[in-house]
Image (cartoon, grey):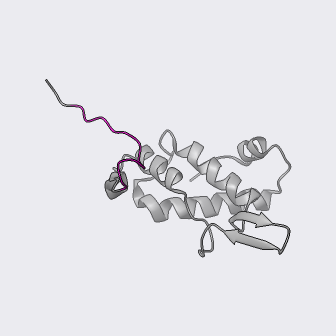
Amino acid sequence: MALFTPIELRTLLSRPLSDAECELAHELTVDAFFGEVGDRLTDPPQRGVKAVALMVAARLLTNPQGLRSEQAGGMLQSYADSETGVALSDDERRRLRRAVGMASGAGMLDISPADVGRPTTVWRAL
């Protein structure tokens, strides 16, 4: 299954990449997607999947360690999480699940205080 081509990834990143880098980024992205949505991912992929796949692969190649912040004085580095490998962000996960027709489930439930979250509108039929 081809989520994207090496040419698309090279064009997005605007830099040369070896075939091995492109293949590894693609395989890790496919593996992460199957881990999230399983067999709902079709061949060819549904509309919207390619955009998410390219986002994940580009992030993987530009920031493979998941570095979140870095400080020069005292050499402080913090990472996104303690996981290794490819971890989808909340936005990537939501967009992927929507593209394959899955509801976001409990991820759509907002239990934060009202002054923190975005305002929501409930539409009711008249």
Picture coordinates of residue 39 (x, y %)? 41, 58
- Name the residue furthest top: 126
Answer left or right for 38 relative to 17.
left
- Name the residue furthest front: 115
Which quarter of the image is occupied by the C terminus?
top left
Picture coordinates of residue 6 (x, y %)? 73, 49
Q: Is residue 115 magenta?
A: yes
- Image point (57%, 64%), residue name: 87
Q: Is residue 42 visible?
A: no
4 above or below 61?
above
Picture coordinates of residue 58 (x, y %)? 70, 52
- Image point (77%, 41%), residue name: 11
Q: Is residue 14 visible?
A: yes
20 above or below 94?
below
27 above or below 46?
below
Answer left or right for 96 relative to 23.
left
Q: Main secondary structure of the magenta part?
A: loop
Q: Is residue 4 magenta?
A: no
Q: How many marks?
A: 0
Q: Nearer the viewer, residue 109 or 119?
A: 119
Picture coordinates of residue 33 (x, y %)? 51, 59
- Image point (50%, 55%), residue name: 90
Answer left or right for 44 relative to 72.
left
Which region of the structure is painted magenta? 112-123
